[in-house]
Image (tube, rainbow, N blue to C red):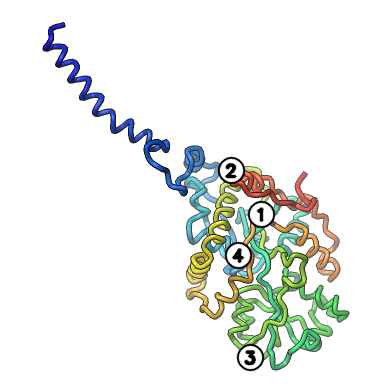
Amino acid sequence: MPATASIRTALRRGIVAAAALPLLIGALASCGYGSEATKDEPKAADAADAGKKLSASEVRIGYFPNLTHATALVGLQEGLIEKELSGTKIKPQSFNAGPSEIEALNGGSLDIGFIGPSPSINGYVKSKGSNLRIISGSASGGVKLVVNPDKIKTLDDLKGKKIATPQKGNTQDVAFLNWISEKGWKVDPESGKGDVSVVRTDNKVTPDAFKQGSIDGAWVPEPTASKLVSDGGSVLLDETALWPDKKFVITNIIVSQKFLKEHPDVVEAVLRGTVKTNEWIHANQDKAKASANARLEAEGGKPLDAKVIDPAWPSIAITDDPLAATLKTQSEWAVKAKLIEQPDLAGIYDLTLLNKVLKAAGKPEVSDAGLGAK
């Protein structure tokens, strides 16, 4: 080859190599070479999973506008659940009572729900174990007995007084009836009449009833409890004091068995989102409190006052653990109060996907207290 031709060939090869070099550097950098990847950057495998299209185009998620449903409030507000769904759309639905959410789950108009233990038990038993599964915990605590301090100064003073609970047979109603029974007092669980008048009152109405004097106190979840305190009430008892380790389930995550069977990938993605949401809440308490309040404002038109949310927030423990043993205890209380027949709760839990998510995140697995699906 002539010398000039060799020079021209070498030059062309040099130009091509130079042009390819930035592409090679970029490719190496994206793999973590040549630059330090940030700790928030997903691993390649995680990114691939996140980009994979899931089996359902949407998932319908129900929850209450309560601080005890903080995982749902924050997870939706911050997009932490949606981020895991790879394009599957969330259709959020807000409920004010457990029975209506259970009806939606059993009726097929809801896929996944945040809900208390008593409605979970009732829904499972009503369907003879065929429709629902508890797949995760969400919150513990956040329930208080708030009273008018002018009328009630000690727990013994409750006798003869009118105390509100949110609904007959709901989680707080069952706990209060059990507490009354352990005091040796008598109350008819159906009518609420007896040594203490148990007045079933919607949480939205309870603060007005308290201010008007038609009730003397209430056994209620947050933020209703702190609303009553801001209106002059006094906390006479925090329910956590009645439980071993001061923990009891107040909110579960449940799923329709049909949706779980047909779309386990979507359920797993939602659980990845809730686990990451709970982790974010623990690491960012002030931001999480503000986020939950922003979601409540979007739901109800106005945020909670600082004098309500500030004392309410720290009384709720956010957790992935369903605290299954405490649900079993609550079912025993409902039977004791003659609100339900002795239930067969075998199979009410399916924590397979949750434990898979927890293990992948380097977190300890949780127990179903022997009530898992076989």
Mark 1, secondary structure of its residue: strand
Q: CA distance from mark 4 to mark 2?
A: 23 Å
Mark 2, secondary structure of its residue: helix
Q: Badge 1: how crowded within 10 Å, few (<14), some, or many (20+)?
A: many
Residue 278 percent location from the top left of the image: 58, 58
Q: Which is closer to the viewer, label 1 or label 2?
A: 1
Residue 36 percent location from the top left of the image: 41, 42
Q: Are marks 1 and 2 in contact (CB under 8 Å)?
A: no
Given the image, on which type of amino acid does mark 3 rest?
Gln
- The image quadrant where one finds the N terminus is top left
Can you identify the residue that label 1 sits on?
136
Q: Are marks 3 and 2 in contact (CB under 8 Å)?
A: no
Residue 6 percent location from the top left of the image: 16, 12
Whichever of labels 4 and 2 marks the residue nearer the N terminus, that label is 4
Given the image, on which type of amino acid does mark 2 rest?
Asp
Can you identify the residue that label 4 sits on?
69
Q: Badge 4: how crowded within 10 Å, few (<14), some, or many (20+)?
A: many
Mark 4, secondary structure of its residue: helix
